Image (tube, grey):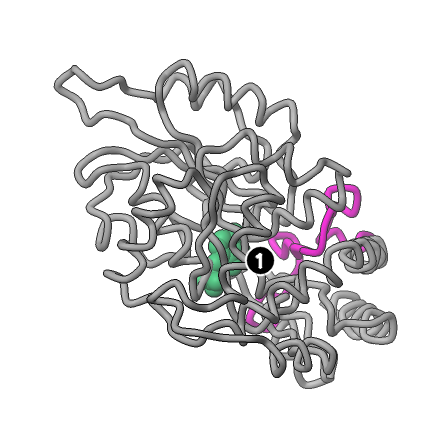
Amino acid sequence: MADLRSDTVTRPTPAMREAMASAPVGDDVFGDDPTVNDLEAHVARMFGHEAALFAPSGTMANQIAMQLVVPAGEELLAGADAHVVTYELGAAAALGGISTRTWPSRGAALDVDEIAGMIRPAGYPSVPTRAIAVEQTHNLGGGGIVPLATLHRLHDVAKSAGVALHCDGARIWHAHVAEGVPLFTYGQLFDTLSVCLSKGLGAPVGSLIVGSAERIARARQIRKRMGGGMRQVGILAAAGRYALDHHVDRLAQDHARARRLAEALEPFGVVDAAAVRTNLVPLDLTKASMDAPTLVARAAERDVRITVMLPRLARAVTHLDVDDDDVDRTIVVLSDLLRAA
Ligand SMILES: *Cc1c(COP(=O)(O)O)cnc(C)c1O
């Protein structure tokens, strides 16, 4: 079975399990878990921030970060295709009381002037804008990378407006590897970041919120309120630390495999291979005679698993547990199905 549904399907490697088994632990709600404390300090340093906080999921990390920078009843700006808007089940509104206004879906191709024009200052009868959230890499944007120059311009816009900038960096590692931009450089551009250990990095669980010491102290309270205070969680932090030490540079292999898959499928008119920069391969079926659920079901019958994103959008993802043979098999099966379609 070639499982290209998501980079969340990876299982911990034997070496990662060993690191988990031997991790010193304590009650992290008391701040007593040395492995968690070490991971938090390490990740804060990587991004050049004062502090970081371990959280059970990327969704919780994003939601905690947004509650840090947007008071209830005030406003967040994000793309209509952002994970925080599309896939977090209304959490910003339901849990944070946050009002969200969106710019049109542009994936990673942000229009900084458009975003700047949307900011509404405090002191007027309108809802004040408090934060802007961007995604790196962009999930629904097919793993696209927001260029560093764009982020610098957005940073300047946010700073001069007194608005916070949050990065949903679930796959920021992929942007770092694909572009050669240091994580530290990305870190300096944002007030808060969320980063995920359980996607391409291959840890079973875990994300972190990164920010100032003051914000992370508040984040700890919000995490507790949301039910995310965990106890001897060093066994999971150890998996995350192992992933950071051993699974970042190898993402280049995932990117190369994704590109190879995209190039093989490009002749069927379903993907622009040059746009595949990281590990996500979106398959646009608007011109194919088969919709996404049909393609996904037929591929599964032949032991190739991909996912349905939208009625006419499917997606294949390369990751730690996908090798060259899996990619070969995926190319053969999807080519057969798309040729017939
Ligand atoms: C996966 C993902 C998250 C977090 O998802 P969880 O499943 O809650 O860990 C956040 N943002 C983006 C862009 C993602 O792809």
Q: Residue at x 44, y 74 (%)?
A: 26
| Quadrant for the N terminus in the image | bottom right
Residue 310 seen in the figure: no
Residue 334 seen in the figure: yes
Instruction: Please determine whether, in this image, residue 40 is positioned above or below residue 80.
Output: below
Q: Is residue 21 magenta?
A: no
Residue stretch rendered in magenta on the structure: 266-294
Q: Amino acid at mark 1?
A: Leu
Q: Position of residue 192 (x, y in %)?
A: 44, 39
User: Would you name the residue on which mark 1 appears?
Assistant: 313
Q: Residue at x 19, y 41 (%)?
A: 72
Please identify the quarter of the rendering in which residue 122 is found.
top left
Q: Position of residue 195 (x, y in %)?
A: 53, 52
Please identify the quarter of the rendering in which residue 320 is found.
bottom right
Q: Residue at x 66, y 57 (%)?
A: 283
Instruction: Please determine whether, in this image, residue 310 is positioned above or below residue 133.
Output: below
Callout 1: few (<14), some (14-19), or many (20+) C-alpha neighbours within 10 Å?
some
Q: Is residue 207 left or right of residue 42?
A: left
| Quadrant for the C terminus in the image | bottom right
